[in-house]
Image: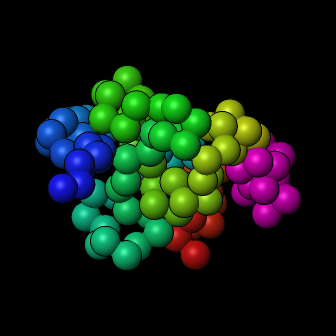
Amino acid sequence: MSVQRPTKYSNGSFHVNAAKIRRRGEPCHLCGLHIDPTLGDYHPGRFTIDHLQPGAMGGHPRSADNLRPAHRYCNEKRGTRDAREYRAAVTAEAQLADIVNPNGYDPDAAQAHLER
């Protein structure tokens, strides 16, 4: 008889915490842009839950303190990198893509970049 190892979904707390975070309507913690709750499952800008400290790095998979809202694109692109490291890379990428204009950050241009 094999022993089943618990997963992040096994006791339901992950889904409960994810639903609470979704209802709050917070922006993506990685790029700072709004997350459209109406986007379908396969859209890169859809809502996902990101773990501040990935499970691969010892983070708790169900703890509300370790869960943050993120776009699917940002979450997948970040992988297991540290969130600060990812944000620095996104900022550098945004500057290279001319998302940051001479007058400051342009959220409309950044949102358009995310939707490409």
Q: Is residue 19 visible?
A: no
For the residue pair 101 and 68, the one nearer the viewer reads as 68
Q: Position of residue 106 (x, y in %)?
A: 65, 50
Q: Is residue 83 visible?
A: yes
Residue 103, magenta (yes or no): yes
Q: Residue at x 23, y 48 (%)?
A: 3
Residue 81, magenta (yes or no): no
Report which quarter residue 116 is drawn in. Answer: bottom right
Q: Position of residue 26 (x, y in %)?
A: 36, 38
Q: Is residue 14 left or right of residue 16?
A: right
Q: Is residue 78 left or right of residue 58?
A: right
Q: Is residue 94 left or right of residue 2?
A: right
Disc tally is 0
Q: Residue at x 37, y 62 (%)?
A: 46
Q: Residue at x 58, y 36 (%)?
A: 57
For the residue pair 55 and 37, the one nearer the viewer reads as 55
Task: Using the image, determine if residue 81 lies above or below residue 79.
Answer: above
Q: Which corner quadrant holds the N terminus?
A: bottom left
For the residue pair 10 and 1, the one nearer the viewer reads as 1
Q: Position of residue 36 (x, y in %)?
A: 34, 58
Magenta highlight range:
89-105
Colour option used: rainbow
Q: Residue at x 26, y 43 (%)?
A: 6
Report which quarter residue 83 is drawn in. Answer: top right
Q: Is residue 5 left or right of residue 76?
A: left
Task: Using the image, determine if residue 110 lies above or below residue 68.
Answer: below
For the residue pair 21 and 38, the one nearer the viewer reads as 21
Q: Residue furthest front?
A: 1
Q: Residue furthest top?
A: 65
